[in-house]
Structures are given as structure tokens and as C-alpha cells.
Amino acid sequence: MELPVQYQVEDASKGWILEAIWACIPVFNYISLKDLLWIFSAFILERKLVFLSKNIHLLTSTMSVIRSLIKPFRYPFPLVYNLPEVLMAICDAPGAAIIGINKGESYLQEENLLTDYPSCIFICLDEEKIHVDKTANKLDIPQLGNIEKSLLPHYAKFNADLNYNIVDFSKKAKAATANKKTLKFAGNAEIREKCIKVLEIFKTTLEEKILKLIPVKPIVKLDKV
């Protein structure tokens, strides 16, 4: 006897969430809210972000979530989930990018990536550290209203850490120590709703602080230039 095939289709109004909702739980558990907002600021300022982790699932999940945080906008720059060593020079290419390297923090020192590519921001997920050049540490954080205050009660369900984990790589780094967190992908209905709420706050903030400020009519028409 053949059983009928059943499909569950999400509400069309929440279709934009689908590419990230599956990855939110492990990412939010690993990254503190302040670090997430700092990374998000660097992201929308079109800095080159290089994520490192020995866990390919955590690596690709984090990159997918970060890219989804700019909805309803689209990310027009390269997105490389696992960069081969032979293509490492892409870290020195002009322009923004999101790059993944399937290795731990020690790889930065071994390959001199911190000194060879000072324009990059290196996010070591296993060790919970963000390595930046001293100039990048003073990012002009975009004024996005009370986004941190809005996110806090929902994000606290995943990660209650309220500290920054930013390291100036012009200074000698401490020995790498991977964290002991368990990678969780599953969650109950309440956790799923919290994930959706976090994504919705980012989307609403961008709509109100950026999208609504874009002129409806073009300021200059190209045919008259």
C-alpha cells in the first residue's frame, strides 16, 4: 500500500525566512548579541568577513544567517562557504565578501593571515573571537535605533553573554582554546518563534532606518546628465 506524500508549505508572507530559520539556533547559541551586532555592522558597511571553524556545519550555518540578516536587501558580493587554500589570495581582492575557512584559530598564525590580509575581519567561531586590525575595531556603527534593546529579550533564550569578544591582532594573541558548546540544530516551537522574531527585528529595522529613507523618485535622471 502506497502512502500519500504530504508537503508542508510555509505562509507566503514568511517565505524570506526559510533560507535562515534552520540555521539560527546553532548560530545564536554560539555568537553573543553584541558580537552579532558588531559583525552585522561590519557586514552592512561592506567589510570583508572571514569566518573560521573546524565544524563545517557551524561555518556554513553562520554565513547563511549573516547573509539573511540584510533582508529585504540582497548581498551582491562573493559568498564562499569553504575557501580552498589555493584561492586564499581572494582575501586580498578589493571589495566586500563573506568567506569561510574550514579550520580553527591556530590556522591564522600558522599561515600569517592576520598580517597578510589586514583588511579582513577574522571571526573564529570555535574560539569565540573576532580578530580585527586596530582601525577596524573602531567601526562607525550605523545608527539603527534601539535594535539591541529590541533583540535582547528574544536573543537571551539562546545566548545570555553580553560581552564583546574582539581582539586587536596587532597585539600578541593568546593561545587558541575552542569552546565546549554543543552544536544544537533542533528546538521546540517557542525557540523557533524566537528565531523568527530575531530575524523580523533585523528586517523591520532595516526597512525603517534605511529603506524608508531612500527617495521614491530618482534624484538625478541619467538622460539629463
Image (cartoon, grey):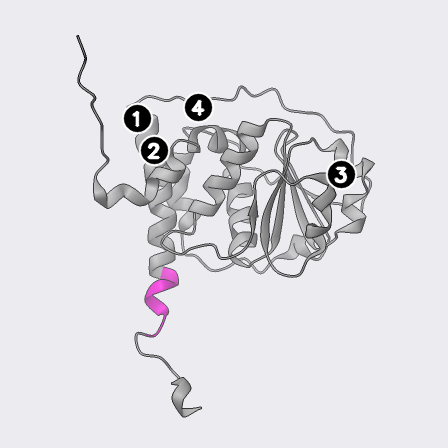
From the viewer's perspective, tell me whether residue 79 is left or right of residue 207. Answer: right
Q: Which residues are magenta?
A: 209-215
- Please give the label number shown on residue 194: 2
Circle 3 SS class: helix
For label 1, the residue is: 190
Circle 2 SS class: helix
Which residue is rendered at x = 34% and y = 33% of the image? Answer: 194
* Mark 1–mark 2 distance (CA, rounded to whole Å): 6 Å
Which comes before the other along the chain, label 3 or label 4? 3
Say which of 150 and 40 sits in front.
40
Quarter of the image where one finds residue 150? top left
Which comes before the other along the chain, label 4 or label 2? 4
Crowd around label 1: few <14 · some 14–19 · many ≥20 (10 Å) = few
Which residue is rendered at x = 41% and y = 85% of the image? Answer: 222
Give the amino acid type for the residue marked by disc 2 in the picture: Lys
* Mark 3–mark 2 distance (CA, rounded to whole Å): 34 Å
For label 3, the residue is: 108
Q: Position of residue 139 (x, y in %)?
A: 61, 57
Q: Position of residue 55 (x, y in %)?
A: 60, 26
Give the amino acid type for the residue marked by disc 1 in the picture: Glu
Quarter containing the N terminus: top left
From the viewer's perspective, tell me whether residue 122 is left or right of residue 1. Answer: right
Please say whether residue 142 is one of the residues in the magenta stretch. no
**Which dot, 3 or 1, sits closer to the camera?**
3
Crowd around label 4: few <14 · some 14–19 · many ≥20 (10 Å) = some
Which residue is rendered at x = 18% and y = 13% of the image? Answer: 3
Which comes before the other along the chain, label 3 or label 2? 3
